[in-house]
Image: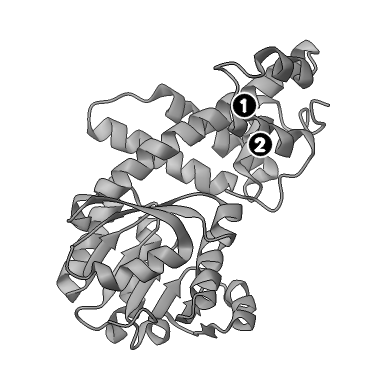
Amino acid sequence: MTDKLTVSVLGTGIMGAAMARNLARAGHSVRAWNRSRDKAEPLAADGAHIAGTPAEAVEGADVVLTMLYDGPAALDVMRQASPALRAGTSWIQSTTAGLDGVGQLAEFARKKGLAFYDAPVLGTRQPAEAGQLLVLAAGPVDGRDTVTPVFDAVGARTVWTGEDGAAGSATRLKLVANNWVIAATSATGETLALAKALGVEPRSFFDAIAGGPLDMGYLHAKSALILEDRLSPAAFAVSTAGKDARLIVEAGEQHGVRLDVAAASAERFERAAAQGHADEDMAAAYFASFDEGSGESTTR
């Protein structure tokens, strides 16, 4: 198997577009498709072929990579691609699909004779654009030589979690990691909202915890987006974070674990989206702490 592959990228939003661009830069032949074609068109400047349909995109591909909103969206698009899918083709599903979703995708792959790799990624817009994502992957050992060049092009490191993508071990790890990200984001927003309400300068809080075990880079990164009004373009959108939070809560419920913080975070993202922040960075959940309109000025 040559290291130069024909890769079909289905879904060219924030993450998918960056992944497709890095695949093209690595010398792979990229066929890109997106439901809204205008989001895929800029990739033509990087040498990607912009396909009109999922079936056109996957025809003759060595690898199909899906980076779509959720499991049902990924399944719908792969069904559209179905007439042109070849048995034996490697399918890298990088959508955060949840436990039920990844099972449904794996079943589709089994019926079509595809080599299924469950491979969600950790990282947001900037590491995606730099090809520095962390790939969490599970799938058969036979055939990894085909998907490894793809992972190398989009990520800085690949962590293999198992040999059966259908078992969802990579998705499980992604949900655990995202639970921490979502909790930290919610805590950041609520802390800044409380500081605003109590008349406390955020800098006083940052100085108080500086260099200690409570300090963390993520707090400063997300706080800066809020305080400096840099919520667009989103690194990870409110709407997507809300979807992931709901998947996390569902996973906990299925395994007898009550995740109160994740459930509250899902509600916060939903409120922020209803206030008009759906497409902004997930840090915009800060505004969910206020009645609509009252938190529009930052804590500065």
Foreground label between 1 and 2: 2
**Residue placed at 82% from the left, 31% from the top?**
297
**Residue placed at 36% from the left, 34% from the top?**
249
Against 168, is 299 above or below?
above
Tell me residue 116's x, y (percent): 24, 65
Q: Is residue 147 left or right of residue 208?
A: left
Residue 57 lies in what quarter of the image?
bottom left
Tell me residue 210's x, y (percent): 67, 18
Mark 1: amino acid: Thr
Q: Nearer the viewer, residue 236 or 149?
A: 149
**Residue picked out by circle 1:** 188
**Residue picked out by circle 2:** 221
Against 134, is 93 above or below?
below
Of the image marks 1 and 2, the number of the one nearer the N terminus: 1
Tell me the CA gap for discs 1 and 2.
10 Å
**Numbered label tally:** 2
Mark 2: amino acid: Ala
